[in-house]
């Protein structure tokens, strides 16, 4: 998406941590999301963070939000081969007449054995 | 728990034909959203409906139309299909006023030959 940017590719060794970054432009973004998409499959919601938070942790996943810099990151600890996928960040600032999720360009995560 | 149902899951059409995609939201969800994901691209919002009325509109071509019915299911009608319409079409649903909690269906893969 033109308002949400991500790096296109990331390669990580199995067992290492992966950090996927995202920048967005809409300062009114209220909710920010991370989705995972495996080849030919649908969108799996991994986690989301409300804009008044700066960190959220859920098992191997840690989301960091820097609202000042409009920067969102997803850290995957102990990366496994099953983590290979495309990861999309997305944002929404829901209000009347604006209900769309805006997705980033997606980062393809490749795991090196 | 019941999820969003989309049918068909796969559809092959020829250029200039018409296609109809269906979406059945999660029970009690009254708002439906449609997204289009072209090959190698991020999902793009097309249109959304609440209580059978269009609630938000994105970059939906004039050849496409959509509606929501009294049982809240929605249909996306695409006419004069072009090769560039080949994509994965996602439907999502939510409760009204909860656009930040959109639940995605598995998608319909449309191939135009």
Image (cartoon, helix red, strand yellow):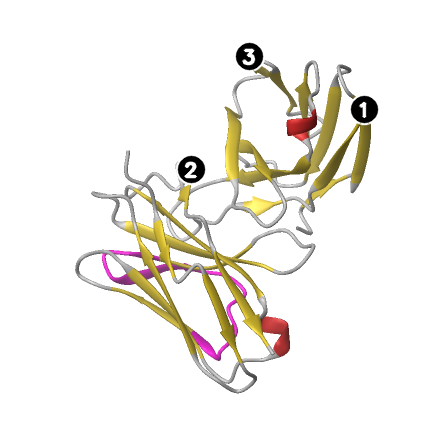
Could you tell which of marks 3 and 1 lies nearer the N-terminus? 3
Q: Nearer the viewer, mark 2 or mark 3?
A: 3
As drawn, A75 above or below A95: above
| Image coords of residue A68 (percent x, y) | 68, 25
Label 3 marks which chain's residue?
A: A
Q: Which mark is residue A59?
A: 3
| Image coords of residue A91 (percent x, y) | 55, 39
Q: Residue at (51%, 37%) from the top-left corner?
A: A44
Q: Which residue is mark 1?
A: A113
Whether the magenta-drawn stretch holds residue B51 is answered as yes
C-alpha separation, residue under disc 2 versus residue under disc 3: 22 Å
Q: Nearer the viewer, mark 3 or mark 1?
A: 1
Q: Secondary structure at mark 2?
A: loop
Verify CB contact (< 8 Å) between mark 2 and mark 3: no
Question: Left or right: where does residue B76 sit relative to residue B74?
Answer: right
Verify CB contact (< 8 Å) between mark 2 and mark 1: no
Q: Which residue is mark 2?
A: B100
> Can the viewer see residue B95 in this picture?
yes
Q: Residue at (66%, 28%) from the top-left corner?
A: A83
Q: Residue at (63%, 51%) from the top-left corner?
A: B42
**Which span is picked out in magenta?**
B49-64
Whether the magenta-drawn stretch holds residue A16 is answered as no
| Image coords of residue A20 (percent x, y) | 72, 28
Q: Nearer the viewer, mark 2 or mark 1?
A: 1
């Amino acid at each position: 998406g033109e308002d949400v940017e991500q790096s296109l590719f990331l390669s990580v060794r199995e067992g290492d941590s992966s950090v996927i970054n995202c920048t967005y432009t809409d300062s009114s973004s209220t909710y920010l999301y991370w989705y995972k998409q495996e080849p030919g499959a649908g969108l799996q919601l991994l986690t989301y963070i409300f804009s008044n938070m700066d960190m959220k942790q859920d098992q191997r996943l840690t989301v960091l939000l820097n609202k000042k810099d409009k920067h969102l990151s997803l850290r995957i600890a102990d990366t496994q081969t099953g983590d290979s996928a495309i990861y999309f960040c997305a944002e929404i600032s829901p209000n009347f007449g604006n209900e769309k999720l805006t997705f980033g360009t997606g980062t393809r995560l490749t795991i090196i054995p | 728990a019941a999820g969003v149902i989309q049918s068909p899951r796969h559809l092959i059409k020829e250029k200039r034909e018409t296609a109809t995609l269906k979406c059945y939201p999660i029970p009690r969800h009254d708002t439906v959203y449609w997204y289009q994901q072209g090959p190698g691209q991020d999902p793009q919002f097309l249109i959304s409906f609440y209580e059978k009325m269009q609630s938000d509109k994105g970059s939906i071509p004039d050849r496409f139309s959509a509606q929501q019915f009294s049982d809240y299911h929605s249909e996306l009608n695409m006419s004069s299909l072009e090769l560039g319409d080949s994509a994965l079409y996602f439907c999502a649903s939510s409760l009204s006023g909860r656009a930040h909690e959109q639940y995605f269906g598995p998608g319909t893969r449309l191939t135009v030959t």
